[in-house]
Amino acid sequence: MAHYAFLDNNNIVTEVIVGKDEGEENTDWEVHYGNFRGQVCKRTSYNTSGGQHNNGGIPYRKNYAGIGYSYDEQRDAFIPPSPFPSFLLNEETCLWDAPVPYPTDGESYTWNEEEGEWTLVITEE
């Protein structure tokens, strides 16, 4: 089973569907679904994130597409919306990196955009 993303005129994902596997019935399903809907259609892989396939398969377009993601034709990649204005696009993974690395002390943090730093999440016991 394959997944396909439909794009609007600005290359923003408007919908993701489950469809036929590529090559099945000797049909180019991206073209078929795109013509049927009158939108550009691109295959995406549920198991792909950061340019890696979780099961060792072929990664499709860097990341699994989601509604609101953009499709970059030059990178042939789906890119999620930036979570914060200060985050930088990682050219290799097409994911967004904080300007300061996430702490590795095992605690939970949230990004504080105003301060430009990770803030420890305090949980009540």
Image (cartoon, helix red, strand yellow):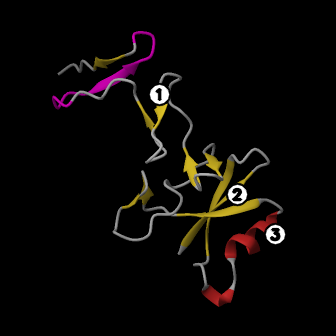
Question: Which dot marks residue 115?
Answer: none
| Residue annotated with mark 2 | 6
Determine crowd level at label 1: few under 14, some 14-19, many 20+ residues with C-alpha closer than 10 A: some
* Marks 1 & 3, CB-CB < 8 Å contact: no
* 106 drawn magenta: yes
Q: What amino acid does circle 3 point to?
A: Asn
The magenta region covers: 104-115
Q: Is residue 4 left or right of residue 91?
A: right
Q: Marks 3 and 2, Cα distance to the nearest angstrom?
A: 11 Å
Which mark is first along the chain, 3 or 1?
3
Residues marked 1 and 2 touching at CB (< 8 Å): no
Residue 109 in the image: above or below residue 81: above
Task: Specify whether 12 is left or right of 64.
Answer: right
Alpha carbon distance from label 1 to label 2: 26 Å
Viewer-side residue, 36 vs 82: 82
> Tag 1, which secondary structure?
loop
Q: Position of residue 106 (x, y in %)?
A: 17, 32
Q: Which numbered disc flags the more N-terminal residue, 3 or 2?
A: 2
Q: Are marks 3 and 2 in contact (CB under 8 Å)?
A: no
